[in-house]
Amino acid sequence: MQFTLDFNNTMSDVLGSEQGFRPEDIDGLKKQANEIHKNLQARRRTDIGFYNLPYDEKLLKDVLSLSKELAGSFDTLVVLGIGGSSLGGRAIFNALCHPYHNLLHSVGEGRLSPNASIGDVPSRCGRPQGSPLQARNKRSVLRIFFCDNIDPDGFKPLFEILNLKKTVFNVITKSGETAETIAQFMVIKKLLEKMIGKKYRDNIIITTDPLKGALRKIADEEGFKSLPVPPNVGGRYSVFSAVGLFPSALAGVDIKKLLAGARYMDEMCDTDDIWKNPAYMSAILQYLAYKKGKNISVIMPYSNALRDFAEWYLQLWAESLGKKVNLKGEAVNIGATPLKALGTTDQHSQLQLYMEGPYDKIITFIEVKKLKNKMPIPRIFEGFKEIGYLGGHSIEELFKAELDATRIALTKNRRMNYAIAIPEINPFTIGQLLFFFEVQTVFAGSLFEVNAFDQPGVEEGKRLTYGMMGKKGYENKKNEVAKWPKGAKRYII
Ligand code: PA5
């Protein structure tokens, strides 16, 4: 079984000519695709660094050796980072670790067994050989918490369940200056100093630019252990750097296999033949859909393990492609709005809108062919014809049937959709999937003719925040906020 992209349900043969694409629509982009391919291949050697991460032996060695070094001393990892500095690691964790990973440890316990090896701990992550109970007994990996939001009502209560001596904090910020992450860092630094004393530095690992930024300076001057984020790798493309790999390694994920999956996908995408390149084809479908007025792009995995993966994709897509100006500097205000839905849950929530609302969506399903768990449904309630039919089937059968049924129902309603399928969830296929969406996004960026690597739109909000928080040089922003109208009373109820 292979990674597949089935886009039948986007084509006019199936959806009709009003809603679907003709093969000629796709072929019309061949020349452009060829040029984009050449450009991306050249730029992977210069400014688009994410392509090379899965091949970086030194990075892998450094991540594995630091994880091994820490594994014996801590039972919990807290990741402090936001946006691209959190979502990738979280997506891997959600996909590859036990769904109740953190509950497999009891609070205050979880010290790794002295013999445990982080490089080869597939007991819980990478989807287990052996039961959760065996995994818990091995205690071979750390509990992981991702604290991306600074809402104190979410952040502070975490400290009620941590044993600080056994907790390592991974402060991740490429710029080394993101207010949210640095504020969290300042809080925990003081706290650790107070609780642990001189050796508190052992409990902090910094992941940041190797040369630039305030945090790099602090790490070097104060002697914190650190890992680099390569300068040519932007936050949302950093999942295969130490940003995503280090927390994953500490969670017990087989990161070698994850990287192998990414390399495999890189090979699959190393062709300018759009009918053979799944990531380019997927980007083309998204692009053509947008041109056809379908300006909402829904991602709908049928897998709980891919819930956070969908979050990661949302950020990648939205921040990369939602832009005011194109590469020529012309105002375009472009970008499809990404939405996430989870099958089957959102069949009972958003599906009504997708079925009958405006024809403004393209839906990408992600199907996992082979699920890990089997759950037969017992033959009971046979006297009740409303529910008794379920007996003798299985939960996975029902899950699959619902996916197929949803695809058919949408297609019957001429709602554009396509499906990506992976044979099962494991580190290799997750590596494939992550890399696939990175390539899709940069390729789509070129089709839309926007810079997929910047995010100028978020800067003004940051500047106003700096002003309010008293950062030097932003006094005018402070005044701007102070003078901002409070709003007419008649519009406030
Ligand atoms: O993709 C991006 O560049 C952003 O989402 C960043 O990851 C996010 O703003 C956090 O930035 P930093 O890693 O510098 O703290």
Image: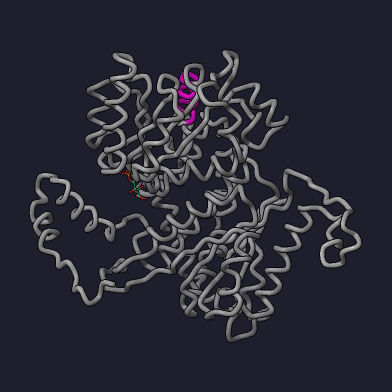
Position of the C terminus, as image quadrant, is: bottom left
Measured as percent of width and height from the top left, residue 190 is found at 27, 26
Residue 448 placement: quadrant:
bottom left
Residue 366 covered by magenta stretch = no
In the rendered image, the vertical position of residue 212 relative to residue 412, given as above or below: above
Give above or below for 107 relative to 458: above
Here the colouring is: one colour
Residue 296 seen: yes
Q: Position of residue 110 (x, y in %)?
A: 55, 22
Residue at 54 percent across and 19 percent down: it is 111
User: 59 or 276, which is in the foreground?
Assistant: 59
The image quadrant that residue 271 belongs to is bottom right
Q: Residue at x 85, y 55 (%)?
A: 393
The residue range painted magenta reads 60-70
Q: In screen coordinates, is 2 left or right of 150? A: right
Q: Residue at x 57, y 30 (%)?
A: 252
- The residue sitting at the bottom extreme is 18
Q: Residue at x 66, y 37 (%)?
A: 127
Residue 304 image point, x, y percent? 62, 50
Please state the horizontal and vertical placement of residue 130, each as a whole percent of the image: 73, 30
| Residue 233 visible, this orientation | no
